């Protein structure tokens, strides 16, 4: 960006005012050259996005049709270009019944998984390296739940009525194996767990029994 600055730009950057903190702030927020332009269409009622050759991503015609470009005027009179992307993945409804859905959560992702499974009975739940609560991860000697304890999964798991498969590595260096064991013991409908001997927090997928246990659970143990 520095190579494209004009002489007046350089003067404003280093001289107005010549304080190191101001120079660093202005240098950090030098915008790059635009890679697109927003132009009105033939009717003048809608705007179209035109990408330059410098754009890192070139949209196809089909993707262009999913874009809605518009301008928003701020209270100070500036215009901000906005883009709305219609994407099926963000559709809130897929007409799939909960009993046909398997919830899968890993590590911190087991927190919203357990919370959702507590509210809705689904086809099954898979908890990969779950944690008891945030406080118990930070302070392993914690034996009870406190009102300020974040992510209290241990308090919610007894209310999960779906079949639950718990997976945990015995040498987990991030969330101790005892977390997975305690979650398993509190599950009303826990199936045979998978304790991967010698596995850590991020390598369970590398063990052959991981895929084998998932296949058995999904194809043989669910109705």
Image (cartoon, helix red, strand yellow):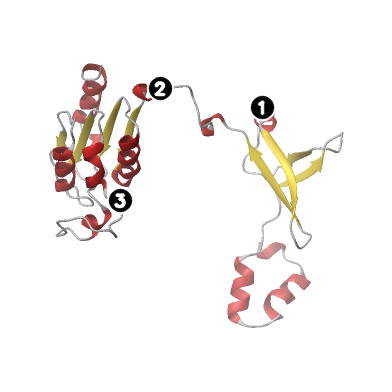
Direction from residue 82 to residue 161 in the image, left or right = left
Whichever of labels 2 and 1 marks the residue nearer the N terminus, that label is: 1
| Pointer 2 local density, CA inside 10 Å: few below 14, some 14–19, many at least 20 | few
Q: Is residue 135 above or below residue 215?
A: below
Query: Is disc 1 placed on a helix, strand or loop?
Result: helix
Q: Earlier in the sequence, mark 2 or mark 3?
A: 2
Is residue 213 toward the left or the right of residue 8 in the image?
left
Disc 2 + disc 1, Cβ < 8 Å: no
Disc 3, SS: loop
Left or right of residue 38: residue 187: left
Residue 51 visible, this orientation:
no
Tell me what residue is drawn at x 63 percent, y 76 percent. Answer: 23
Classify residue 136 by image quadrant.
bottom left
Any part of residue 103 in sight: yes
Q: Label 3 to label 1, Cα distance in Å?
A: 42 Å
Circle 2 sits in a helix, a strand or a loop, which is it? loop
Residue positioned most to the right: 43
How far is disc 2 from disc 1 in space, using C-alphas?
A: 30 Å
Residue 197 location (% of width, % of height): 12, 39
Given residues 136 and 121, the one toward you in this image is 121
- Please determine whether, in this image, residue 145 is positioned above or below residue 96: below
Q: Position of residue 184 (x, y in %)?
A: 16, 38
Q: Is residue 10 above or below residue 165?
A: below
Q: Which residue is mark 3?
A: 151
Q: What residue is disc 2 on?
A: 97
Q: CA distance from mark 2 to mark 3?
A: 27 Å
Tag 1 residue:
62
Residue at 17% x, 28% y: name it.
191
């Amino acid at each position: 960006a520095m190579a494209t600055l004009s002489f007046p730009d350089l003067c404003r950057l280093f001289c107005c005012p010549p304080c190191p903190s101001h120079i660093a702030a202005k240098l950090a927020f030098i915008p790059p050259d635009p890679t697109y332009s927003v132009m009105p269409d033939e009717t003048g009622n809608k705007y179209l996005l035109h990408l330059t050759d410098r754009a890192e991503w070139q949209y196809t015609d089909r993707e262009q049709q999913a874009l809605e470009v518009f301008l928003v005027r701020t209270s100070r009179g500036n215009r901000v270009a906005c883009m709305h992307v219609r994407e099926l993945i963000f559709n809130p409804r897929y007409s799939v019944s909960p009993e046909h859905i398997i919830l899968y959560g890993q590590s911190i992702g087991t927190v919203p998984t357990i919370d959702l499974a507590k509210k809705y009975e689904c086809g099954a739940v898979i908890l990969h390296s779950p944690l008891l609560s945030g406080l118990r991860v930070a302070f392993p000697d914690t034996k009870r739940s406190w009102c300020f304890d974040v992510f209290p999964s241990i308090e919610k798991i007894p209310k999960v009525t779906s079949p639950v498969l718990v997976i945990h590595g015995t040498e987990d260096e991030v969330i101790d194996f005892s977390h997975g064991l305690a979650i398993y013991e509190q599950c009303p409908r826990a199936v045979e767990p998978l304790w991967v001997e010698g596995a850590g927090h991020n390598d369970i997928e590398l063990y052959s029994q991981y895929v084998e246990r998932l296949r058995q659970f999904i194809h043989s143990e669910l109705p």
